[in-house]
């Protein structure tokens, strides 16, 4: 966020340890919060709102993966599958057991957390590429199970239709209603993550990432905390899956394939590993890029390709761009978009007295 | 000085064919500074690693206040009050000094995921309370100006000091220091020596000190144990050990760096 440290004096540890110790940063955050809560949803049309909903859902998922991969240093290629666990749990509970939305939401998160920590067990022994492969196996096992165990998927096209979410008898059936619902859940997710990483548990995660031997030597139970990180990350994934499901009105495993897992990895790499702001930037970027790209290609693509070719060009162009961007950020700016942003704000941080 | 606090009995550690420790027994009394010296490759670091649970011995026992800790995992051993520093510094380099020290408080903190993510009740109270404790250590080590600095960007001498701070944050009963003054200039060494003495005197913390600088060892330690090629070859007061012909022989027979440490006495 925008920080200006000049002329700020702190008089207690409580004040020094606040989330935004600097007044201007606090008001910036407040300003953004007011905009996303008030004028935007009132003024935006349904299309803009539906795009904003997709972005917000993606933010929650990216945040979850960043907790595990960015902050704790455990690579996962199973994030999409953990989302599907949340999605199907909620869908089954809502349709067959008629659980209300918010209970289905919580249950989806908890179930995903349980499954996620189970597939996190190999992280005790293996790291890096090997862990990536192990979680990839998890991705395929879960995908296969959803597809082949008819009790879960209901058998027909492996998808379950869910009713519109309702809160206390009030049915939410507009994009605007969904916007508020999703925004509240995502805001809670962001605040919780911010708090987590300024306290004991979050610090332990980062310690494990930075130096696992040192972490153990100062008394951190590495195995427990790695599993905890898998659990929290998968909880976020599960809730993300539930939100997707209610947004689309259907739980479908095709929404949560390996491609989804890779997309979320792309979000946090491009946005910034180990950063909450980075998760937000990355999620927005990766969600909006294909949409903007479509406008561009449909707008000027006709000049170069036939109409029937445009669709094919679009998907390939998108893949090329994603791949190129990931390579760019991994090599040139490993701290991602949030670092570029920080470079700009750092300039203003101590402005007008840079020395 | 009372009963033995840390007792090591007949420790055998080897790596493939290399016997790093062969039947080493040594004990530290409560509140004493025990120096472990010896030429390069003598097994000093291996000893510290085995006490702190990083290496598993093939034979032998490590006891802390009578409790067998030989096969406990490192985090449990830390929880019992054993803190250490590393020969080549093992700090969390990307974090601030403050976060490194707060991590040293980990075993004394309780807040779980829920309290933490709400930053409510216990979590907040705990953070503030431990922050105060950490500030005392910052004051003690005279590192106030760098508390918000990223550790990896600090000069070597300061990093060593921060690492000592992280170990102290654990409020250890025994502190294992692996060459805390290696690579330091004279002034930094004097500071470090003062901190070690103060910790020992004010907190009564037992200290196991591995150090090559003989002057430091003579000045600081109450007793000295000498390792050579994985065996304990001598033990006694600093003066006894210095005049022991076996020790002089071990140092003369080894590579120059260690021999120089003994200076004029050899
Ligand atoms: N992890 C390891 N793997 C293989 N061999 C090791 C390992 N750790 C130590 N050794 C070997 O054990 C012996 C003792 O090493 P150690 O590091 O304990 O010596 P030291 O007394 O600390 O020496 P220095 O003064 O150089 O620090 C050496 O021969 C070393 O090569
Ligand atoms: Mg050593």
Image (tube, grey):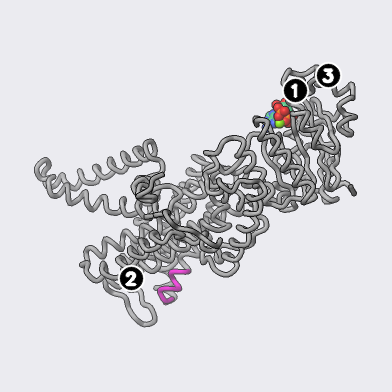
When asked about the image quadrant of residue A48, the answer is bottom left
Mark sitting on residue A180: 2
The residue that disc 3 covers is B266
Q: Is A223 or B129 nearer to us in this picture?
A: B129
The residue that disc 1 covers is B258
Q: Is A300 or A89 nearer to us in this picture?
A: A300
How many neighbours does mark 3 have within 10 angstroms: few (below 14), some (14-19), or many (20 or more)? some
Boundaries of the magenta span: A98-106
How many neighbours does mark 2 have within 10 angstroms: few (below 14), some (14-19), or many (20 or more)? some
Q: Name the spot of residue A355 as percent of width and height, x first.
A: 41, 44
Q: Name the spot of residue B261 as percent of width and height, x first.
A: 76, 24
How many neighbours does mark 1 have within 10 angstroms: few (below 14), some (14-19), or many (20 or more)? many
Q: Earlier in the sequence, mark 3 or mark 1?
A: 1
Q: Is residue B52 left or right of residue B22?
A: left
Q: Is residue A104 magenta?
A: yes
Is label 1's Cβ within 8 Å of ligand 1?
Answer: yes
> Magenta part mainly helix, strand or loop?
helix
Q: Decide: marks 3, 2 in contact (CB < 8 A)?
A: no
Q: Is residue A213 magenta?
A: no
Q: Measured along the vertical axis of the image, is residue B191 above or below residue B144? A: above
């Amino acid at each position: 966020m925008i920080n200006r440290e000049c002329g700020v004096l702190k008089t207690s540890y409580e004040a020094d340890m606040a989330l935004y110790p600097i007044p201007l940063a606090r008001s910036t955050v407040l300003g953004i919060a007011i905009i996303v809560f008030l004028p935007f949803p009132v003024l935006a049309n349904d299309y803009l709102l539906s795009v904003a909903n997709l972005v917000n859902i993606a933010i929650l998922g990216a945040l979850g993966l960043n907790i595990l991969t960015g902050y704790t240093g455990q690579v996962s290629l199973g994030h999409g599958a953990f989302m599907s666990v949340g999605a199907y749990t909620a869908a089954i509970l809502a349709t067959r057991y008629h659980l209300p939305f918010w209970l289905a939401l919580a249950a989806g998160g908890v179930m995903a957390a349980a499954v996620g920590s189970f597939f996190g067990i190999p992280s005790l022994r293996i790291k890096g590429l090997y862990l990536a492969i192990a979680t990839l196996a998890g991705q395929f096992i879960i995908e296969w199970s959803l597809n082949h165990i008819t009790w879960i998927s209901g058998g027909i096209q492996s998808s379950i239709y869910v009713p519109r979410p309702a809160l206390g008898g009030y049915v939410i059936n507009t994009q605007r209603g969904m916007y508020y619902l999703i925004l509240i859940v995502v805001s809670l997710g962001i605040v919780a993550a911010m708090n987590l990483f300024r306290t004991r548990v979050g610090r332990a995660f980062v310690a494990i990432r930075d130096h696992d031997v040192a972490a153990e030597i100062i008394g951190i139970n590495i195995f427990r905390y790695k599993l905890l990180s898998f659990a929290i990350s998968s909880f976020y994934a599960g809730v993300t899956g539930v939100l997707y499901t209610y947004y689309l009105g259907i739980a479908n495993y095709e929404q949560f394939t390996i491609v989804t897992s890779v997309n979320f990895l792309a979000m946090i790499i491009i946005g910034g590993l180990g950063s909450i702001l980075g998760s937000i930037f990355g999620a927005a970027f990766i969600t909006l890029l294909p949409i903007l790209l479509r406008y561009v290609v449909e707008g000027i693509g006709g000049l170069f390709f036939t109409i029937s070719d445009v669709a094919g060009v679009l998907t390939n162009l998108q893949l090329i761009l994603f791949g190129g961007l990931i390579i760019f950020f991994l090599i040139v700016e490993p701290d991602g978009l949030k670092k570029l942003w920080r470079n700009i704000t750092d300039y203003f941080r101590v402005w007008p007295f840079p020395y | 000085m009372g009963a033995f606090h840390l007792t090591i009995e007949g420790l055998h550690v080897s790596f493939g064919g290399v016997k790093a420790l062969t039947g080493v027994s040594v004990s530290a009394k409560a509140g004493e500074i025990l120096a472990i010296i010896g030429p390069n490759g003598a097994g000093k670091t291996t000893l510290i690693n085995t006490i702190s649970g990083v290496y598993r011995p093939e034979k032998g026992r490590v006891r802390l206040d009578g409790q067998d800790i030989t096969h406990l995992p490192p985090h449990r051993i830390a929880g019992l009050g054993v803190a250490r520093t590393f020969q080549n510094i093992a700090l969390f380099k990307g974090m601030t000094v403050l976060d490194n020290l707060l991590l040293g408080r980990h075993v004394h903190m309780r807040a779980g995921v829920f309290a933490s993510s709400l930053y409510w009740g216990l979590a907040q109270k705990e953070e503030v309370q431990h922050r105060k404790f950490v500030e005392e250590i910052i004051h003690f080590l005279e590192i106030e100006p760098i508390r918000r600095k990223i550790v990896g960007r600090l000069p070597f001498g300061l990093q060593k000091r921060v690492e000592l701070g992280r170990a102290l944050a654990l409020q250890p009963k025994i502190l294992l220091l692996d060459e805390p003054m290696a690579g330091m200039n004279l002034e930094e060494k004097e500071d470090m020596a003062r901190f070690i003495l103060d910790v020992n005197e004010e907190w009564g913390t037992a200290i196991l000190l591995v150090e090559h600088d003989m002057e430091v060892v003579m000045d600081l330690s109450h007793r000295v144990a000498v390792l050579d090629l994985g065996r304990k070859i001598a033990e006694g007061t600093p003066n006894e050990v210095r005049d022991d012909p076996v020790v002089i022989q071990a140092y003369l027979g080894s590579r120059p760096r260690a021999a120089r440490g003994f200076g004029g006495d050899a």
